[in-house]
Amino acid sequence: QVQLVESGGGLVQAGGSLRLSCAASGRPFSPYAMGWFRQAPGKEREFVAAISWDGIITYYEDSVKGRFTISRDNARNTVYLQMNSLKPEDTAVYYCAGGRTRYAGNQEGLFASWGQGTQVTVSS
């Protein structure tokens, strides 16, 4: 069974940075795309970023382009989300997601496994 464990969330002031990590276990890591989603209070979960199995192709939600960077280390079975220039509207629970195939986009159905989430709070 796939396990995804996020870490790195916390409280940060607007304009600050955080790096989220997601450690995967339970299945081979490198053959699958990975992604990050987030859910703010009272809102539906939304796509943030995705990365292909080899780390070459990345895809971002428009509001985070230029501020967030997704990356992966297949040797460490870990995917990262570097978040810079954080805004209060980035406040949410962030979820790591494991893809069903080598490539993934912004749809939840493209992902087969989910972490428990880590809270990110950005104060103004």
Image (cartoon, grey):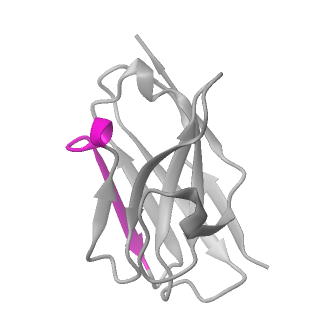
Where residue 13 sits, quadrant-wise, is: top left
Q: Give the residue drawn at x 41%, y 64%.
A: 105
Q: Is residue 72 magenta?
A: yes
The reply to whether the magenta stretch includes residue 31 is: no
In this rendering, position of residue 62 left or right of residue 99 = left
Q: How many marks?
A: 0
* Residue 49: % across, % down: 39, 54
Residue at the left extreme? 66
Image quadrant for the N terminus?
Answer: bottom right
Where is 4 relative to 60, above or below?
A: below
**Residue farthest to the top, as pictured:** 124
- Position of residue 58 relative to residue 64, above or below, is below
Residue at 55% in and 83% down: 29
Residue at left offset 34%, top offset 29%: 86
In the visual, does 85 lie left or right of 1? Answer: left
Q: In the drawing, does residue 78 fall left or right of residue 113?
A: left
Q: Position of residue 74 (x, y in %)?
A: 45, 82
Quadrant of the drawing holding the C terminus = top left
Residue 8 in percent (x, y) is at 54, 46
> Please, which residue is most extreme toward the right here?
1
| Residue at left offset 35%, top offset 83% | 54
Provide the residue span drawn in magenta.
62-73
Give percent across and percent down for residue 77.
53, 78
Q: Nearer the viewer, residue 85 or 2?
A: 2
Q: Is residue 2 above or below residue 39?
A: below
